[in-house]
Amino acid sequence: MAQPSLQRVIQQAGRVILGKEPQIRLSLACLLARGHLLIEDLPGVGKTTLAHVLAKLLGLQFHRIQFTSDMLPADIIGVSVYDRDNATFKFHPGPIFSQLILADEVNRATPKTQSALLEAMQEHQVTAEGETRSLPEPFFVIATQNPSNQVGTFALPESQLDRFLMRIELGYPDAQAERALLEGADRRDLLPQMTACIEPAELIELQHRTREVHAAAALLDYVQAITAHTRSSSD
């Protein structure tokens, strides 16, 4: 991430998400690789704030979807409503039609509702009522997940987990960052002051350039060895 614009994103994000530069870098790497990010951690450690910060600094259209147990797939994808004046049904897009989606507490929704994200995350499109509609580019989903031992959570299906390139934790802040949080302003109050460090068009170009990154044969051997071990190991 030698690009000056990306370094500015990391620097500015670090002013809000204190002491979490490795996680910020991993989030950006996930986005540049055209993947999606799953953050699993306790409430209150900054998962939602991180998504807000990235949307601001990357200049992306942002929408937060708060997942609940009574949510339906149509609440995410959208629904057709009958237009009496034209005697036709008009499709009203759901919140999925944004560049950066925060699927907040995704495992509080039922597997049926979670499945509404599958096509969108894999193919950057959604099919509703027999018609396929493309999603805006770039398209990036950040999902937060509460620990599975908490009341009211549903396990993410294997097909859903497969859509995420990375799964990270933020963890508690260290003592220095915790002291700065206690003495400083509310991190959410800093969000309106932030401006984009990069434009969506430049971000798309950087995503294309990641495909040109050379992977040494030794690295590929290492990846294959890890993959083979996960398939055969009983641990």
Image (cartoon, rainbow, N blue to C red):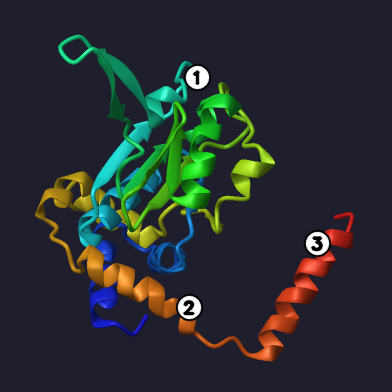
In whole angstroms, how far apart are the C-alphas of marks 1 and 2? 39 Å
Return the mark for residue 69.
Answer: 1
The kind of residue on which mark 1 rests is Ser
Residue 87 horizontal side relative to residue 141, left or right: left
Instruction: Kindly indicate the quadrant of the structure image that contains residue 78.
Output: top left
The mark that comes first in sequence, 3 or 2, is 2
Residue 50 horizontal side relative to residue 220, left or right: left
Residue placed at 17% from the left, 50% from the top?
Answer: 191
Residue placed at 20% from the left, 58% from the top?
Answer: 59
Asked if marks 3 and 2 touch (Cβ < 8 Å), the reply is: no
Return the mark for residue 60.
Answer: none
Question: Dot 2 lies on which element?
Answer: helix
Most distant residue in the top direction: 84
Which of these two is toward me, 125 or 35? 125
Return the mark for residue 230.
Answer: 3
Question: Dot 3 lies on which element?
Answer: helix
Position of the C terminus, as image quadrant, is bottom right
**Whether residue 15 can be seen here:** no
Residue placed at 70% from the left, 89% from the top?
Answer: 218
Residue placed at 21% from the left, 45% from the top?
Answer: 188
Residue 37 horizontal side relative to residue 151, left or right: left
Residue 162, horizontal then vertical, whole percent:
63, 50
Residue 184, horizontal then vertical, whole percent:
18, 53
